[in-house]
Amino acid sequence: MAQATEIQWAGTVEEQQIAWTVFELLTARARFYSEDAPIRQRLTNLQEYLTSTSQVALPGDANMARELISSSLATNHHVFGREEADGDITFSTTKAGLPPVDPASKVDKAHTYKSRLFTGSRVPTEEDLQAVRGIGRDIPEIIMVMPEPTNVIFPDVYSDEVEPEIAAEAELFVEEEPEPTQASSVLVGGVEVDLTQDPAAILAQHGPAFQRVLSNFLEEDFRFVRFGNEYYLEDRLERLSKGQLKEIKEYIEERGEPLSDEEILSDGLVNRRLGDADYSLQRFTLNFRLQREKKDFRFVGTAADRLWATSQLPPIGQTVRKATEVAQDYRYLTDPELADQDPTTTLGGAGTLVLRHVLTWYESENGVLPVGPSAQLMMPQPLMEDQTVVVLRLQDPMNYATYLAELRLGLGNRGTYIAGLEEFYQSALVPGATFSLIQGTTSNEFTLEYERQPQTESRLLQYDSRKERWYFGPVVYECPIDPGYLLTEEKVGGLNGKKRVSEADRKRVDRLLQSAFELVGEPGEGGTLTALIDDLLPVLNIERPFSSRYVRSLIQSAQSPQFTLEDEALGLASYAGS
Amino acid sequence: MNVDEAHVREIIERLIASGAPQGIETLTQWFIGAVINQRSGE
């Protein structure tokens, strides 16, 4: 065997012969053993075999023969292992020509799972736990370094430089320095606050003054950062890499709608969690970092529901007219004298507000809902100073649907309105329908509700955008109706086959009012047309939104003498004709 | 009445100990506490 020829046998020639013979004998019966499997044989059996076969020369005396075999194999201990058990000696070897090794000794005990799990284990101390939360680290000196004395609010606070002359003087008269007086009151925002009071009383009475002083300071101090109305330390916030920001952006765009910070944290940051910090700190970090990326992200949520959209994400609500145009159309809402007070009621004991509204053609076509002064009370407040959109979550339990809508906040002379209702309007309502908007559990949650009615079919006003003409066609609806606002053929049949007013005429409210008189007015003496404002409103609201107060002010305006308010109580007006 | 280093230190320490961002109302409470502590310690 190859192994046998390589083995260097030790001992005398006789001993070498015995060892070689025994090795050949053992390996012959272990043909199918693995290379390192032990091959064992008792000394008694070996002696019996060698004596009987006479392969080697052994002494005649059995004891001497046993002793010779034993010593021959023991001399070649690099080939044979020796064990003693049950009063007999057992020799063993392997096909590889090496003494067998105990399998247990081959196991690497230094790197077992058990050793890894328990070596050096100990119960974590409070310090360790704090370190995991990221709060046990020493406060870096950079945080505690006070800023340069550029603070215009408190210019004298940080000045610790002492002029040499004064310092020298101070050394001379150090013993004459007066004892510090224990002040029991401080002046906060011009008001003297007695510090001997209970802290709760101080907070209740002077909290806002202290808050003003502190928030002014925090805004100036670079060590503090703010998101919404929460503050933390810039130094303690993790940074988001460009890759992570890109990942978040792509995730929002893939989902196709604004996502909350919680969703982004749990699903959007696939590759990495934010450090070991607490969840609230992770949320703050994410919101603060995204807030800084104004080019790519815009905040569209509230304090409770922090939603983020990207610059590439299409706006919710595709109005027929441009968003700025709609906002301009609703500019009368910014004037409390012109905006109607939509009827609002409270629901149950929780003070939930309910807004009842009649849908107009303009609102139905653009999927919008004006937010007048009373509706404003129901709307969520934006969290950011420069925020122009708040995303609303609308439930439609009647149709088992949910919608996202945008509360577009008016700035300057632009009115506030909700966009994104076109699907609800088209699927459930017709112009003239009444429905309710009910406040939900959070500030940006609402429910859309209407009482389902028996099916009704009417010929209602419709617009053929291909032929660019008005026409009347049968429409089946199940929603409650305000009959005054329903645009039936009987009421506004004069529009049939006509074109829409031109853009130039649409911008002139007097021309629209004139057209409305011509459509629904009753001819009077001398070619005048008279109509109730309530009858003019549905027609006026086809091309452009108007409130009852707005129409009344137009009729009474000195700039349009052709219109006269005949009866203020009835709301009866007349048009003298062109 | 100014915000001084001792007040800020207390606010920073408490922010770090809390391990979470805090609203201005909470920070104001801490600020008042720091002012009272400072005056009583003088």
Image (tube, rainbow, N blue to C red):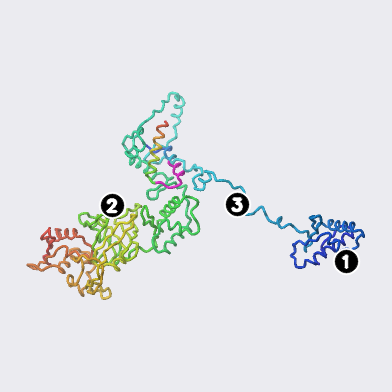
Verify CB contact (< 8 Å) between mark 3 and mark 1.
no
Residue A455 picture location, percent across and down: 25, 71
The prevailing secondary structure element of the residues shown in magenta is: helix
Q: Is residue A221 above or below residue A258?
A: above
Dot 3: element = helix
From mark 3 to mark 1, how far is it between C-alphas? 58 Å
Q: Residue A30 in magenta?
A: no
Name the residue beneath numbered marker 3: A117
Q: Seen from this angle, which residue lies furthest left?
A: A525
- Percent of width and height locating residue A225: 42, 48
Choose the circle earlier in sequence order: 3 or 1: 1
Q: Are marks 3 and 2 in contact (CB under 8 Å)?
A: no
Q: Chain of mark 1?
A: A
Q: Are marks 1 and 2 on the same chain?
A: yes
Residue A403 or residue A61, whichever sits in front: A61
Distance in Å between CA atoms under marks 3 and 2: 58 Å
Q: Is residue B4 above or below residue A272?
A: above
Image coordinates of residue A396 in percent, x first then y, are: 32, 63
Q: Position of residue A335 (x, y in %)?
A: 22, 55
Q: Earlier in the sequence, mark 1 or mark 2?
A: 1
Q: Which residue sits at x=79%, y=57%?
A: A81
Q: Residue at x 41, y 44 (%)?
A: A221
User: What mark, if any, has residue A349 been given in the picture?
Assistant: 2
Residue type at tag 1: Thr
Tell me the mark number nearer the camera, choosing from 3 and 2: 2
Question: Could one spot residue A16 in this view of the protein?
Answer: yes
Q: Amino acid at mark 2?
A: Gly
Q: Quadrant of the C terminus of chain A?
A: bottom left
